[in-house]
Amino acid sequence: MITINGTFASLAVQELLARLHPYRNRPNSEFAYVGGSLAEVQLYTESEGEPCAVFKPHIGRGDMTPLLNMPGIL
């Protein structure tokens, strides 16, 4: 279990570094999802798609005053 967690933790750090300092040959938008299979020793990526229709009206609302546009939340 330690090796599996370590592998995917290092992939997460690599993803953070790629977002902070773009070094890939392809744009970061093609790496919206990165998954992998250790049984196949293979990584899978998915590109960014359209925002979820359910969440789209609420994206960014946490950065409002009052929070979430709900004065009752302290």
Image (cartoon, grey):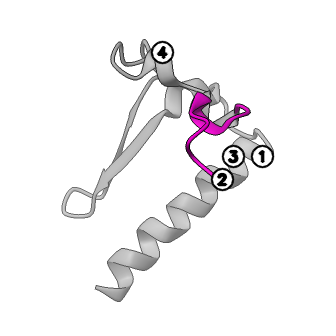
What residue sits 56% from the left and 33% below the top?
Answer: 70
| Residue 61 located within the stretch drawn in magenta | no
In-image side of 73 versus 43 (left or right): right
Residue 28 placement, left or right of 51: right
- In the image, is 61 to the left or to the right of 34? right
Disc 2 residue type (three-letter): Leu
Give the magenta range.
64-74
Disc 3 residue type?
Answer: Ala
- Secondary structure, mark 4, is helix
Q: What residue is shown at x 29% (from left), y 58% (from top)? A: 41
Which residue position is annotated with label 3?
18
Q: In the image as oriented, which residue stretches furthest toward the left? A: 39
* Residue located beneath label 4 in the image: 57
Residue 28, horizontal then vertical, whole percent:
62, 31
Quote the CA–CA distance across marks 1 and 3.
6 Å
21 lies above or below 26? below
